[in-house]
Image: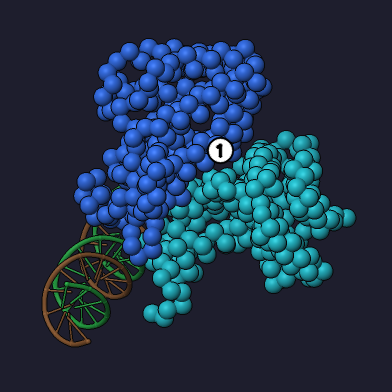
Chain colours: A cyan, B blue, C brown, D green
Amino acid sequence: MMHDMPHKSLTARTCDLLREAIVRARYAPGQKLRIDQIGRELSASSGAVREALSRLTAEGLVIAEPQKGFVVSPISRRDLQELTEVRIAVECRCLAESIAQGDVDWEARVVAVRHRLAAIKGSARRPDAPEVRRWHATHLEFHDALASACPNRWWGRLRSQLFTQSERYRRLSGPFDETGRDVEAEHNAIADAALARDVEAATAALTVHLSRTTEILLNSRILFVDVPPAPDSGGAAD
Amino acid sequence: MMHDMPHKSLTARTCDLLREAIVRARYAPGQKLRIDQIGRELSASSGAVREALSRLTAEGLVIAEPQKGFVVSPISRRDLQELTEVRIAVECRCLAESIAQGDVDWEARVVAVRHRLAAIKGSARRPDAPEVRRWHATHLEFHDALASACPNRWWGRLRSQLFTQSERYRRLSGPFDETGRDVEAEHNAIADAALARDVEAATAALTVHLSRTTEILLNSRILFVDVPPAPDSGGAAD
DNA sequence: TCCGACGCAAAAATATATTTTCTCTTGCAA
DNA sequence: TTGCAAGAGAAAATATATTTTTGCGTCGGA
Protein backbone atom coordinates (compact mmCIF):
# COMPACT_ATOMS: atom_id res chain seq x y z
CA MET A 1 0.00 0.00 0.00
CA MET A 2 1.73 3.12 1.19
CA HIS A 3 5.47 3.14 1.32
CA ASP A 4 5.99 3.83 5.01
CA MET A 5 9.39 2.18 5.12
CA PRO A 6 11.43 1.73 1.99
CA HIS A 7 12.23 -1.91 1.37
CA LYS A 8 11.66 -3.37 4.76
CA SER A 9 9.96 -6.68 4.59
CA LEU A 10 6.70 -6.99 6.44
CA THR A 11 8.05 -10.02 8.22
CA ALA A 12 11.04 -8.14 9.58
CA ARG A 13 8.73 -5.39 10.70
CA THR A 14 6.50 -7.86 12.49
CA CYS A 15 9.53 -9.47 14.06
CA ASP A 16 10.77 -6.16 15.44
CA LEU A 17 7.32 -5.27 16.71
CA LEU A 18 6.97 -8.63 18.42
CA ARG A 19 10.39 -8.42 20.01
CA GLU A 20 9.68 -4.96 21.30
CA ALA A 21 6.36 -6.14 22.70
CA ILE A 22 7.94 -9.09 24.45
CA VAL A 23 10.84 -7.10 25.83
CA ARG A 24 8.46 -4.46 27.09
CA ALA A 25 6.46 -7.19 28.78
CA ARG A 26 3.30 -6.50 26.83
CA TYR A 27 3.18 -10.26 26.62
CA ALA A 28 3.79 -11.95 29.93
CA PRO A 29 6.40 -14.70 30.28
CA GLY A 30 4.84 -18.09 29.71
CA GLN A 31 1.89 -16.62 27.87
CA LYS A 32 0.60 -18.40 24.83
CA LEU A 33 0.99 -16.44 21.63
CA ARG A 34 -1.96 -17.11 19.36
CA ILE A 35 -1.04 -16.67 15.77
CA ASP A 36 -4.25 -15.28 14.36
CA GLN A 37 -4.81 -12.94 17.29
CA ILE A 38 -1.37 -11.41 16.84
CA GLY A 39 -1.96 -11.29 13.12
CA ARG A 40 -5.08 -9.28 13.74
CA GLU A 41 -3.40 -6.97 16.23
CA LEU A 42 -0.50 -6.24 13.94
CA SER A 43 -2.53 -6.54 10.75
CA ALA A 44 -0.25 -9.19 9.30
CA SER A 45 -1.10 -12.56 7.89
CA SER A 46 -0.53 -15.73 9.82
CA GLY A 47 2.47 -16.61 7.69
CA ALA A 48 4.29 -13.42 8.56
CA VAL A 49 3.56 -13.82 12.25
CA ARG A 50 4.67 -17.41 12.11
CA GLU A 51 7.95 -16.46 10.48
CA ALA A 52 8.57 -13.66 12.96
CA LEU A 53 7.91 -16.00 15.87
CA SER A 54 10.34 -18.49 14.40
CA ARG A 55 13.12 -15.95 14.33
CA LEU A 56 12.38 -14.91 17.87
CA THR A 57 12.63 -18.57 18.82
CA ALA A 58 16.29 -18.70 17.89
CA GLU A 59 16.81 -15.45 19.80
CA GLY A 60 15.54 -17.11 22.93
CA LEU A 61 12.59 -14.79 23.44
CA VAL A 62 9.91 -17.33 22.58
CA ILE A 63 9.89 -21.08 22.50
CA ALA A 64 8.03 -23.20 19.98
CA GLU A 65 6.22 -26.28 21.20
CA PRO A 66 5.51 -28.52 18.23
CA GLN A 67 1.82 -28.80 17.42
CA LYS A 68 1.02 -26.56 20.35
CA GLY A 69 2.10 -23.16 19.22
CA PHE A 70 4.41 -20.49 20.54
CA VAL A 71 4.92 -19.33 24.09
CA VAL A 72 6.82 -16.40 25.55
CA SER A 73 9.97 -17.72 27.19
CA PRO A 74 9.44 -18.13 30.90
CA ILE A 75 11.62 -16.30 33.35
CA SER A 76 13.11 -17.47 36.60
CA ARG A 77 15.49 -16.38 39.31
CA ARG A 78 17.98 -18.96 38.22
CA ASP A 79 17.86 -17.84 34.61
CA LEU A 80 18.42 -14.25 35.62
CA GLN A 81 21.38 -15.22 37.76
CA GLU A 82 22.94 -17.31 35.03
CA LEU A 83 22.25 -14.67 32.43
CA THR A 84 23.89 -12.02 34.58
CA GLU A 85 26.99 -14.10 35.10
CA VAL A 86 27.44 -14.64 31.37
CA ARG A 87 26.60 -11.07 30.57
CA ILE A 88 29.19 -9.73 32.97
CA ALA A 89 31.86 -11.84 31.34
CA VAL A 90 30.89 -10.87 27.81
CA GLU A 91 30.34 -7.19 28.50
CA CYS A 92 33.64 -6.94 30.33
CA ARG A 93 35.46 -8.63 27.51
CA CYS A 94 33.97 -6.21 24.98
CA LEU A 95 34.77 -3.27 27.18
CA ALA A 96 38.35 -4.35 27.72
CA GLU A 97 38.79 -4.78 24.00
CA SER A 98 37.25 -1.39 23.36
CA ILE A 99 39.62 0.24 25.83
CA ALA A 100 42.54 -1.42 24.15
CA GLN A 101 41.50 -0.65 20.60
CA GLY A 102 39.33 2.46 20.88
CA ASP A 103 40.35 5.63 19.10
CA VAL A 104 39.30 9.20 19.63
CA ASP A 105 36.01 8.69 17.84
CA TRP A 106 35.14 5.97 20.31
CA GLU A 107 35.89 8.31 23.20
CA ALA A 108 33.72 10.93 21.56
CA ARG A 109 30.83 8.52 21.22
CA VAL A 110 31.05 7.53 24.87
CA VAL A 111 31.19 11.12 26.05
CA ALA A 112 28.32 12.17 23.82
CA VAL A 113 25.95 9.40 24.81
CA ARG A 114 26.78 9.80 28.47
CA HIS A 115 25.85 13.44 28.19
CA ARG A 116 22.56 12.67 26.51
CA LEU A 117 21.76 9.98 29.04
CA ALA A 118 22.46 12.23 31.98
CA ALA A 119 20.14 14.87 30.54
CA ILE A 120 17.12 12.57 30.72
CA LYS A 121 17.21 11.28 34.23
CA GLY A 122 15.19 13.84 36.19
CA SER A 123 11.76 13.00 34.77
CA ALA A 124 8.58 11.07 35.22
CA ARG A 125 8.70 7.54 36.53
CA ARG A 126 5.67 5.95 34.97
CA PRO A 127 6.55 2.66 33.31
CA ASP A 128 5.56 3.70 29.81
CA ALA A 129 6.17 7.44 29.83
CA PRO A 130 7.99 8.76 26.78
CA GLU A 131 10.85 9.93 28.99
CA VAL A 132 11.34 6.47 30.39
CA ARG A 133 11.18 5.05 26.91
CA ARG A 134 13.84 7.42 25.71
CA TRP A 135 15.96 6.70 28.75
CA HIS A 136 15.91 3.00 27.97
CA ALA A 137 16.86 3.62 24.36
CA THR A 138 19.70 5.92 25.35
CA HIS A 139 20.83 3.53 28.04
CA LEU A 140 21.18 0.90 25.35
CA GLU A 141 23.13 3.35 23.24
CA PHE A 142 25.43 4.08 26.15
CA HIS A 143 26.41 0.49 26.66
CA ASP A 144 26.65 0.01 22.92
CA ALA A 145 29.02 2.96 22.72
CA LEU A 146 31.23 1.57 25.46
CA ALA A 147 31.62 -1.68 23.55
CA SER A 148 31.60 -0.15 20.09
CA ALA A 149 35.37 -0.22 19.64
CA CYS A 150 35.56 -3.95 20.09
CA PRO A 151 36.45 -5.16 16.61
CA ASN A 152 35.24 -8.71 17.11
CA ARG A 153 31.79 -9.05 15.59
CA TRP A 154 31.04 -12.27 17.46
CA TRP A 155 31.57 -10.67 20.82
CA GLY A 156 29.30 -7.90 19.69
CA ARG A 157 26.59 -10.23 18.55
CA LEU A 158 26.64 -12.18 21.79
CA ARG A 159 26.64 -8.98 23.77
CA SER A 160 23.63 -7.63 21.96
CA GLN A 161 21.75 -10.87 22.39
CA LEU A 162 22.38 -10.95 26.11
CA PHE A 163 21.50 -7.30 26.49
CA THR A 164 18.08 -7.91 24.98
CA GLN A 165 17.46 -10.75 27.37
CA SER A 166 18.44 -8.62 30.33
CA GLU A 167 16.28 -5.79 29.13
CA ARG A 168 13.33 -8.14 29.40
CA TYR A 169 13.93 -8.65 33.09
CA ARG A 170 14.55 -4.98 33.63
CA ARG A 171 11.25 -3.94 32.10
CA LEU A 172 9.43 -6.46 34.22
CA SER A 173 10.27 -4.66 37.43
CA GLY A 174 7.63 -2.06 36.62
CA PRO A 175 8.54 1.39 37.92
CA PHE A 176 12.16 1.05 38.81
CA ASP A 177 12.83 0.31 42.42
CA GLU A 178 16.10 2.18 42.44
CA THR A 179 16.08 2.60 46.20
CA GLY A 180 18.77 5.12 46.90
CA ARG A 181 20.71 4.09 43.83
CA ASP A 182 22.75 6.53 41.81
CA VAL A 183 22.78 4.96 38.38
CA GLU A 184 24.38 8.00 36.84
CA ALA A 185 27.31 7.71 39.21
CA GLU A 186 27.76 4.07 38.24
CA HIS A 187 27.72 4.98 34.58
CA ASN A 188 30.22 7.73 35.18
CA ALA A 189 32.50 5.37 37.03
CA ILE A 190 32.52 3.03 34.06
CA ALA A 191 32.95 5.75 31.46
CA ASP A 192 35.64 7.60 33.39
CA ALA A 193 37.71 4.50 33.88
CA ALA A 194 37.24 3.50 30.27
CA LEU A 195 38.28 6.89 28.98
CA ALA A 196 41.30 6.77 31.29
CA ARG A 197 42.16 3.44 29.66
CA ASP A 198 42.03 1.67 32.98
CA VAL A 199 40.81 -1.78 32.09
CA GLU A 200 40.77 -3.09 35.64
CA ALA A 201 38.77 -0.24 37.06
CA ALA A 202 36.38 -0.09 34.13
CA THR A 203 35.50 -3.78 34.15
CA ALA A 204 35.18 -3.70 37.92
CA ALA A 205 32.78 -0.79 37.72
CA LEU A 206 30.82 -2.50 34.96
CA THR A 207 30.60 -5.67 37.02
CA VAL A 208 29.29 -3.73 39.97
CA HIS A 209 26.75 -2.00 37.75
CA LEU A 210 25.36 -5.19 36.29
CA SER A 211 25.45 -7.10 39.56
CA ARG A 212 23.62 -4.36 41.38
CA THR A 213 20.89 -4.24 38.76
CA THR A 214 20.34 -7.95 39.03
CA GLU A 215 20.40 -7.83 42.81
CA ILE A 216 17.65 -5.25 42.77
CA LEU A 217 15.60 -7.28 40.34
CA LEU A 218 15.98 -10.42 42.42
CA ASN A 219 14.79 -8.59 45.51
CA SER A 220 11.97 -6.95 43.61
CA ARG A 221 8.47 -8.36 43.62
CA ILE A 222 8.60 -9.65 40.09
CA LEU A 223 6.49 -12.74 39.69
CA PHE A 224 9.00 -15.42 38.90
CA VAL A 225 7.83 -18.90 38.09
CA ASP A 226 10.18 -20.45 40.62
CA VAL A 227 10.06 -19.95 44.34
CA PRO A 228 9.72 -16.41 45.72
CA PRO A 229 12.59 -14.81 47.66
CA ALA A 230 11.22 -16.16 50.95
CA PRO A 231 11.57 -19.96 50.66
CA ASP A 232 9.15 -20.53 53.52
CA SER A 233 6.00 -21.59 51.70
CA GLY A 234 6.40 -25.03 50.21
CA GLY A 235 3.95 -24.44 47.38
CA ALA A 236 5.07 -26.03 44.17
CA ALA A 237 5.66 -23.69 41.30
CA ASP A 238 4.38 -24.08 37.78
CA MET B 1 0.27 -42.65 28.35
CA MET B 2 1.89 -43.67 25.15
CA HIS B 3 5.54 -42.98 24.70
CA ASP B 4 5.68 -39.25 24.18
CA MET B 5 7.73 -39.46 21.04
CA PRO B 6 7.97 -35.81 20.16
CA HIS B 7 5.94 -35.29 17.02
CA LYS B 8 8.57 -33.38 15.18
CA SER B 9 6.78 -30.83 13.16
CA LEU B 10 7.62 -30.74 9.51
CA THR B 11 9.11 -27.31 9.98
CA ALA B 12 11.49 -28.47 12.70
CA ARG B 13 12.48 -31.39 10.56
CA THR B 14 13.17 -29.13 7.62
CA CYS B 15 15.13 -26.82 9.87
CA ASP B 16 17.35 -29.64 11.11
CA LEU B 17 17.86 -30.94 7.61
CA LEU B 18 18.79 -27.51 6.35
CA ARG B 19 21.19 -26.89 9.20
CA GLU B 20 22.86 -30.19 8.62
CA ALA B 21 23.15 -29.47 4.92
CA ILE B 22 24.67 -26.06 5.52
CA VAL B 23 27.09 -27.25 8.16
CA ARG B 24 28.14 -30.09 5.93
CA ALA B 25 28.75 -27.57 3.17
CA ARG B 26 26.21 -29.13 0.82
CA TYR B 27 25.30 -25.52 0.22
CA ALA B 28 28.28 -23.29 -0.37
CA PRO B 29 28.77 -20.08 1.62
CA GLY B 30 27.19 -17.16 -0.17
CA GLN B 31 24.98 -19.40 -2.24
CA LYS B 32 21.44 -18.33 -2.93
CA LEU B 33 18.88 -20.57 -1.31
CA ARG B 34 15.84 -20.81 -3.56
CA ILE B 35 12.73 -21.53 -1.59
CA ASP B 36 10.83 -23.67 -4.04
CA GLN B 37 13.89 -25.64 -5.08
CA ILE B 38 14.62 -26.56 -1.48
CA GLY B 39 10.97 -27.27 -0.98
CA ARG B 40 11.09 -29.73 -3.84
CA GLU B 41 14.33 -31.34 -2.64
CA LEU B 42 13.03 -31.83 0.89
CA SER B 43 9.43 -32.32 -0.19
CA ALA B 44 8.15 -29.54 1.99
CA SER B 45 5.99 -26.61 1.12
CA SER B 46 7.41 -23.14 0.69
CA GLY B 47 5.98 -22.03 4.00
CA ALA B 48 7.84 -24.68 5.92
CA VAL B 49 11.09 -23.91 4.14
CA ARG B 50 10.59 -20.24 4.75
CA GLU B 51 10.07 -20.79 8.45
CA ALA B 52 13.08 -23.06 8.72
CA LEU B 53 15.25 -20.52 6.96
CA SER B 54 14.03 -17.84 9.32
CA ARG B 55 15.13 -19.83 12.33
CA LEU B 56 18.49 -20.48 10.78
CA THR B 57 18.79 -16.76 10.24
CA ALA B 58 18.82 -16.08 13.94
CA GLU B 59 21.35 -18.87 14.36
CA GLY B 60 23.69 -17.08 12.04
CA LEU B 61 23.85 -19.80 9.43
CA VAL B 62 21.90 -17.95 6.77
CA ILE B 63 21.13 -14.31 6.24
CA ALA B 64 17.87 -12.92 4.92
CA GLU B 65 18.06 -10.12 2.41
CA PRO B 66 14.67 -8.44 2.27
CA GLN B 67 12.88 -8.94 -1.00
CA LYS B 68 15.85 -10.87 -2.33
CA GLY B 69 15.64 -14.14 -0.51
CA PHE B 70 17.98 -16.14 1.67
CA VAL B 71 21.69 -16.71 1.31
CA VAL B 72 24.08 -19.01 3.12
CA SER B 73 26.20 -16.93 5.47
CA PRO B 74 29.52 -16.09 3.84
CA ILE B 75 32.74 -17.12 5.45
CA SER B 76 35.98 -15.24 5.76
CA ARG B 77 39.36 -15.47 7.39
CA ARG B 78 38.48 -12.63 9.68
CA ASP B 79 35.24 -14.26 10.75
CA LEU B 80 37.02 -17.51 11.51
CA GLN B 81 39.63 -15.70 13.57
CA GLU B 82 37.04 -13.75 15.51
CA LEU B 83 34.91 -16.83 15.99
CA THR B 84 37.85 -18.80 17.29
CA GLU B 85 38.76 -16.11 19.77
CA VAL B 86 35.26 -16.04 21.21
CA ARG B 87 34.96 -19.78 21.16
CA ILE B 88 38.15 -20.26 23.10
CA ALA B 89 36.91 -17.93 25.79
CA VAL B 90 33.50 -19.55 26.04
CA GLU B 91 34.70 -23.14 25.85
CA CYS B 92 37.36 -22.50 28.46
CA ARG B 93 34.84 -20.91 30.75
CA CYS B 94 32.51 -23.89 30.43
CA LEU B 95 35.36 -26.29 30.97
CA ALA B 96 36.60 -24.48 34.04
CA GLU B 97 33.13 -24.52 35.49
CA SER B 98 32.76 -28.20 34.69
CA ILE B 99 36.02 -28.99 36.45
CA ALA B 100 34.89 -27.04 39.46
CA GLN B 101 31.38 -28.51 39.63
CA GLY B 102 31.67 -31.89 37.95
CA ASP B 103 30.85 -35.01 39.87
CA VAL B 104 31.75 -38.61 39.23
CA ASP B 105 29.08 -38.99 36.58
CA TRP B 106 30.70 -36.17 34.65
CA GLU B 107 34.06 -37.89 34.85
CA ALA B 108 32.43 -41.08 33.64
CA ARG B 109 30.89 -39.32 30.66
CA VAL B 110 34.22 -37.82 29.67
CA VAL B 111 36.05 -41.10 29.96
CA ALA B 112 33.38 -42.98 28.04
CA VAL B 113 33.18 -40.60 25.12
CA ARG B 114 36.95 -40.31 24.89
CA HIS B 115 37.11 -44.07 24.62
CA ARG B 116 34.51 -44.18 21.88
CA LEU B 117 36.18 -41.36 20.01
CA ALA B 118 39.58 -43.01 20.12
CA ALA B 119 38.11 -46.21 18.73
CA ILE B 120 37.04 -44.52 15.51
CA LYS B 121 40.16 -42.77 14.35
CA GLY B 122 41.93 -45.41 12.28
CA SER B 123 39.54 -45.44 9.35
CA ALA B 124 38.73 -44.07 5.95
CA ARG B 125 39.39 -40.44 5.16
CA ARG B 126 36.83 -39.67 2.52
CA PRO B 127 34.88 -36.53 3.40
CA ASP B 128 31.50 -38.22 3.57
CA ALA B 129 32.35 -41.71 4.66
CA PRO B 130 30.18 -43.10 7.47
CA GLU B 131 33.25 -43.38 9.69
CA VAL B 132 34.04 -39.72 9.27
CA ARG B 133 30.45 -38.86 9.92
CA ARG B 134 30.46 -40.84 13.13
CA TRP B 135 33.77 -39.30 14.14
CA HIS B 136 32.34 -35.82 13.80
CA ALA B 137 29.27 -36.76 15.82
CA THR B 138 31.39 -38.31 18.55
CA HIS B 139 33.79 -35.39 18.50
CA LEU B 140 30.83 -33.15 19.23
CA GLU B 141 29.81 -35.47 22.04
CA PHE B 142 33.31 -35.34 23.49
CA HIS B 143 33.38 -31.58 23.75
CA ASP B 144 29.81 -31.60 25.01
CA ALA B 145 30.81 -34.06 27.71
CA LEU B 146 33.71 -31.90 28.80
CA ALA B 147 31.40 -28.94 29.27
CA SER B 148 28.41 -30.91 30.49
CA ALA B 149 28.96 -30.20 34.16
CA CYS B 150 28.73 -26.46 33.69
CA PRO B 151 25.44 -25.63 35.37
CA ASN B 152 24.94 -22.33 33.59
CA ARG B 153 22.53 -22.86 30.71
CA TRP B 154 23.48 -19.61 29.01
CA TRP B 155 27.10 -20.60 28.75
CA GLY B 156 25.94 -23.87 27.32
CA ARG B 157 23.70 -22.28 24.76
CA LEU B 158 26.42 -19.91 23.59
CA ARG B 159 28.89 -22.74 23.44
CA SER B 160 26.66 -24.90 21.32
CA GLN B 161 25.96 -22.03 18.95
CA LEU B 162 29.64 -21.30 18.47
CA PHE B 163 30.44 -24.96 18.04
CA THR B 164 28.01 -25.22 15.16
CA GLN B 165 29.59 -22.25 13.48
CA SER B 166 33.05 -23.71 13.86
CA GLU B 167 31.87 -27.03 12.55
CA ARG B 168 30.93 -25.27 9.36
CA TYR B 169 34.48 -24.16 8.78
CA ARG B 170 35.84 -27.52 9.74
CA ARG B 171 33.71 -29.39 7.22
CA LEU B 172 34.79 -26.99 4.52
CA SER B 173 38.37 -28.16 4.64
CA GLY B 174 37.38 -31.30 2.73
CA PRO B 175 39.48 -34.30 3.67
CA PHE B 176 41.21 -33.16 6.81
CA ASP B 177 44.66 -31.81 6.30
CA GLU B 178 45.91 -32.98 9.64
CA THR B 179 49.53 -32.88 8.60
CA GLY B 180 51.35 -34.73 11.29
CA ARG B 181 48.81 -33.76 13.86
CA ASP B 182 47.89 -36.01 16.73
CA VAL B 183 44.35 -34.97 17.54
CA GLU B 184 43.87 -37.81 19.94
CA ALA B 185 46.85 -36.66 21.98
CA GLU B 186 45.38 -33.18 22.17
CA HIS B 187 42.05 -34.58 23.33
CA ASN B 188 43.80 -36.71 25.91
CA ALA B 189 45.71 -33.72 27.18
CA ILE B 190 42.46 -31.86 27.73
CA ALA B 191 40.63 -34.79 29.27
CA ASP B 192 43.51 -35.83 31.54
CA ALA B 193 43.96 -32.33 32.89
CA ALA B 194 40.21 -31.98 33.36
CA LEU B 195 39.91 -35.26 35.21
CA ALA B 196 42.87 -34.24 37.37
CA ARG B 197 40.90 -31.06 38.20
CA ASP B 198 43.70 -28.91 36.87
CA VAL B 199 41.87 -25.91 35.47
CA GLU B 200 44.97 -24.14 34.22
CA ALA B 201 46.33 -27.10 32.31
CA ALA B 202 42.95 -28.10 30.93
CA THR B 203 42.05 -24.69 29.58
CA ALA B 204 45.54 -24.28 28.19
CA ALA B 205 45.27 -27.59 26.38
CA LEU B 206 41.83 -26.69 25.10
CA THR B 207 43.12 -23.36 23.84
CA VAL B 208 45.93 -25.07 22.01
CA HIS B 209 43.49 -27.56 20.51
CA LEU B 210 41.13 -24.91 19.16
CA SER B 211 43.91 -22.60 18.02
CA ARG B 212 45.67 -25.35 16.14
CA THR B 213 42.49 -26.35 14.34
CA THR B 214 41.91 -22.80 13.22
CA GLU B 215 45.51 -22.40 12.20
CA ILE B 216 45.26 -25.43 9.97
CA LEU B 217 42.02 -24.18 8.45
CA LEU B 218 43.53 -20.76 7.77
CA ASN B 219 46.49 -22.34 6.02
CA SER B 220 44.25 -24.75 4.14
CA ARG B 221 43.08 -24.04 0.62
CA ILE B 222 39.53 -23.25 1.58
CA LEU B 223 38.08 -20.67 -0.74
CA PHE B 224 37.51 -17.70 1.47
CA VAL B 225 35.82 -14.64 0.09
CA ASP B 226 38.55 -12.36 1.39
CA VAL B 227 42.17 -12.38 0.36
CA PRO B 228 44.06 -15.70 0.10
CA PRO B 229 46.84 -16.54 2.54
CA ALA B 230 49.47 -14.94 0.30
CA PRO B 231 48.78 -11.22 0.64
CA ASP B 232 50.67 -10.38 -2.51
CA SER B 233 47.84 -9.57 -4.89
CA GLY B 234 46.07 -6.44 -3.79
CA GLY B 235 42.83 -7.29 -5.56
CA ALA B 236 39.73 -6.58 -3.57
CA ALA B 237 37.54 -9.53 -2.90
CA ASP B 238 33.81 -9.85 -3.37
C1' DT C 1 -19.61 -40.86 42.15
C1' DC C 2 -15.72 -41.58 39.48
C1' DC C 3 -13.34 -43.10 35.38
C1' DG C 4 -12.97 -43.48 30.46
C1' DA C 5 -14.20 -42.87 25.72
C1' DC C 6 -16.31 -40.28 22.18
C1' DG C 7 -17.02 -35.99 19.75
C1' DC C 8 -16.97 -31.16 18.81
C1' DA C 9 -14.58 -26.82 18.46
C1' DA C 10 -10.49 -24.04 18.23
C1' DA C 11 -5.98 -23.41 16.89
C1' DA C 12 -1.80 -24.75 14.56
C1' DA C 13 0.43 -26.78 10.67
C1' DT C 14 0.56 -27.28 5.91
C1' DA C 15 -0.57 -26.46 1.14
C1' DT C 16 -2.01 -23.50 -2.55
C1' DA C 17 -2.99 -19.25 -4.95
C1' DT C 18 -2.18 -14.38 -5.72
C1' DT C 19 0.39 -10.26 -5.71
C1' DT C 20 4.57 -7.76 -5.51
C1' DT C 21 9.37 -7.17 -6.41
C1' DC C 22 13.54 -7.98 -8.54
C1' DT C 23 16.56 -9.39 -12.27
C1' DC C 24 17.93 -10.45 -16.67
C1' DT C 25 17.42 -9.71 -21.36
C1' DT C 26 16.45 -7.31 -25.40
C1' DG C 27 15.93 -3.36 -28.11
C1' DC C 28 16.57 1.38 -29.21
C1' DA C 29 19.10 5.55 -29.29
C1' DA C 30 23.20 8.32 -28.68
C1' DT D 1 29.81 0.26 -29.59
C1' DT D 2 27.95 1.47 -25.35
C1' DG D 3 24.51 2.92 -22.17
C1' DC D 4 19.90 3.28 -20.67
C1' DA D 5 15.23 1.81 -20.50
C1' DA D 6 11.31 -1.04 -20.93
C1' DG D 7 9.35 -5.52 -20.72
C1' DA D 8 9.19 -10.44 -19.81
C1' DG D 9 10.09 -14.00 -16.70
C1' DA D 10 11.21 -15.81 -12.26
C1' DA D 11 11.35 -15.80 -7.48
C1' DA D 12 9.93 -14.04 -3.06
C1' DA D 13 6.43 -12.11 -0.09
C1' DT D 14 1.83 -12.20 1.28
C1' DA D 15 -2.85 -13.87 1.68
C1' DT D 16 -6.15 -17.52 1.78
C1' DA D 17 -7.86 -22.21 2.06
C1' DT D 18 -7.47 -26.92 3.68
C1' DT D 19 -5.98 -30.49 6.65
C1' DT D 20 -4.50 -32.22 11.16
C1' DT D 21 -3.97 -32.09 15.77
C1' DT D 22 -5.07 -30.92 20.34
C1' DG D 23 -7.87 -29.64 24.23
C1' DC D 24 -12.07 -29.63 26.53
C1' DG D 25 -16.63 -30.91 27.50
C1' DT D 26 -20.10 -34.24 27.72
C1' DC D 27 -22.14 -38.57 27.77
C1' DG D 28 -22.15 -43.39 29.11
C1' DG D 29 -20.84 -47.20 31.93
C1' DA D 30 -18.93 -49.30 36.11
| Residue shown at 54% from the left, 59% from the top | A19
Q: Is residue A55 visible?
A: yes
Image coordinates for residue A119, horizontal then vertical, percent: 78, 69
Q: Quadrant of the N terminus of chain B?
A: top left
Residue of label 1 = B86
Name the residue type under label 1.
Answer: Val
Image coordinates for residue A96, horizontal then vertical, percent: 68, 44
Q: Is residue B7 visible?
A: no
Label 1: which secondary element: helix
| Residue shown at 66% from the left, 51% from the top | A102
Image coordinates for residue B203, horizontal then vertical, percent: 60, 23
Please give the chain letter of the residue carrying mark 1.
B
Query: Which residue is at the front of the view, A6 or C25?
Result: C25
| Residue shown at 42% from the left, 79% from the top | A3
Position above or below: D25 against B228: below
- Asked if residue A204 lies left or right of residue B134, the reply is right
For residue C24, what is the image quadrant?
A: bottom left
Considering every residue shown, the one lying at the far front of the view is: B232
Position above or below: A137 against B227: below
- Asked if residue A148 lies left or right of residue B168, the reply is right
| Residue shown at 73% from the left, 71% from the top | A131
Position above or below: B134 against A226: above
Query: Which residue is at the front of the view, B68 or D25?
Result: B68
Considering every residue shown, the one lying at the far right of the view is: A180
- Asked if residue A19 lies left or right of residue A129, the reply is left
Image coordinates for residue B18, horizontal then vertical, percent: 33, 43
